[in-house]
């Protein structure tokens, strides 16, 4: 048990600030749609297929900057988001009119906060570091349960430490950790799965990674340039004709040498905010090459697709967003106070008493 306590304290002292950052940024991001205050952000989502088709044609043919992809307005956010080359982007209303543009993610707090939370401003390397931190967080929760059990008789419900002394912070850390353990396990486990997909096998069973890869793979097509006369209107109408109940979520130009335009849609039964219902169109001819209905995915793929909505509070409405906000703030407190007590509030070694000299 002493070794477990030592590992818990040292690992927490080293990665606690990363976990604290994840908790705080996550608590802010779950409310992103509410605090991005721009014109038309509160508009109702357009469902008319012709209006969506016209807006897509207008945006994808814009000579001022043709987007790499469009994320369409949702029920909670009334603007389309455009991804442009070199980190630039824009928001447009649902008719295709540009509301605001940015040349760098640093001009939009919701964009750089998302990058910090998911990539640590370091791309794939940062994502891997955060995945490792999430695994460490899982170790903290599990080891903390064992360490708390010895002192369970002293448990008190406390959201904040009674005072900023080391003993008070340590007791608060143990009690807050045990109260939030189920939510912490959920958020840290799902976060680690996004980086290390084999982690999904802990819940979904052996062979999950191969099964997911097979279930979610795209069709193949010859390398092809996007036709300058590509009919975006026809593509949107064809997608809605194929899945009439689905909500249009993302349209993306071909990446690298795929030769395909991708359309992503969300069926009413799907939890995932952008859905896993997909269509692929030939970039040179506009021909529909393949389609995937998320409702026909395997059980394991269906469960996997629920991880992100739970993690990011994309289901459950305001009550679940508040729960995950509390979870994020708890992780922030646990991480920052753990680092503070480990590095700056460690108990000082008591000096050895001087031996008494016998009087003669």
Image (spheres, helix red, strand yellow):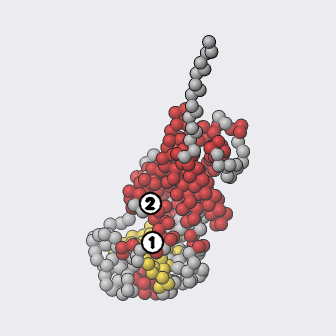
Locate residue 26 relative to residue 119 in the image: left or right.
right
Q: Position of residue 187 (x, y in %)?
A: 55, 54
In the rendered image of this protein, does residue 180 appear above or below residue 85? Answer: above
* Residue 231 in sight in this render: no
In the rendered image of this protein, does residue 137 appear above or below residue 224? Answer: above
The residue shown at (64%, 58%) is 326
Task: Report the disc number at residue 264.
Answer: none
Q: Quadrant of the N terminus?
A: top right
Q: Where is residue 355 in the image (x, y as percent from the top left)?
A: 58, 21
In depth, the one of 220 and 170 nearer the eye is: 170
Task: Report the disc number at residue 106.
Answer: 1
In depth, the one of 2 and 324 nearer the eye is: 2
Locate residue 313 relative to residue 287 in the image: left or right.
right
The residue shown at (48%, 82%) is 100
Q: Quadrant of the C terminus?
A: top right
The residue shown at (56%, 49%) is 340
User: Which sits earlier in the primary sequence, circle 1 or circle 2?
Assistant: 1
Locate residue 69 relative to residue 145 in the image: left or right.
left
Task: Report the disc number at residue 120.
Answer: 2
Element under disc 1? helix
């Amino acid at each position: 048990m002493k070794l477990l306590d030592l590992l818990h304290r040292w690992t927490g002292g080293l990665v606690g600030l990363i976990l604290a950052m994840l908790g705080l940024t996550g608590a802010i991001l779950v409310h992103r749609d509410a605090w991005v205050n721009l014109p038309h952000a509160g508009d109702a989502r357009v469902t008319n297929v012709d209006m969506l088709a016209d807006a897509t044609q207008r945006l994808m043919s814009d000579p001022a900057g043709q987007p790499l992809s469009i994320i369409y307005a949702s029920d909670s956010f009334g603007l389309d988001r455009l991804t442009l080359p070199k980190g630039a982007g824009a928001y447009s209303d649902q008719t295709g009119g540009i509301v605001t543009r940015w040349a760098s993610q640093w001009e939009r707090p919701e964009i750089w906060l998302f990058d910090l939370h998911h990539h640590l401003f370091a791309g794939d390397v940062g994502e891997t570091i955060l995945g490792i931190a999430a695994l460490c967080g899982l170790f903290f929760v599990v080891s903390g349960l064992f360490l708390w059990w010895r002192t369970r008789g002293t448990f008190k419900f406390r959201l904040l430490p009674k005072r900023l002394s080391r003993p008070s912070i340590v007791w608060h850390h143990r009690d807050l950790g045990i109260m939030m353990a189920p939510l912490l396990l959920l958020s840290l486990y799902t976060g680690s799965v996004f980086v290390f997909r084999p982690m999904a096998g802990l819940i979904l069973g052996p062979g999950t990674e191969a099964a997911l890869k097979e279930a979610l793979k795209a069709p193949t097509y010859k390398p092809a340039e996007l036709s300058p006369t590509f009919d975006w209107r026809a593509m949107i109408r064809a997608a809605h004709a194929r899945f009439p109940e689905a909500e249009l979520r993302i349209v993306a130009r071909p990446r690298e040498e795929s030769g395909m335009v991708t359309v992503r849609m969300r069926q009413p039964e799907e939890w995932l905010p952008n859905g896993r219902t997909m269509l692929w169109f030939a970039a040179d001819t506009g021909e529909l090459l393949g389609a995937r209905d998320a409702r026909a995915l395997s059980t394991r793929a269906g469960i996997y697709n629920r991880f992100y909505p739970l993690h990011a509070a994309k289901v459950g409405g305001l009550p679940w967003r508040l729960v995950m906000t509390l979870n994020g703030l708890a992780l922030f407190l646990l991480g920052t106070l753990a680092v503070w007590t480990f590095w700056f509030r460690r108990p000082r070694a008591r000096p050895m008493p001087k031996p008494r000299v016998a009087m003669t």
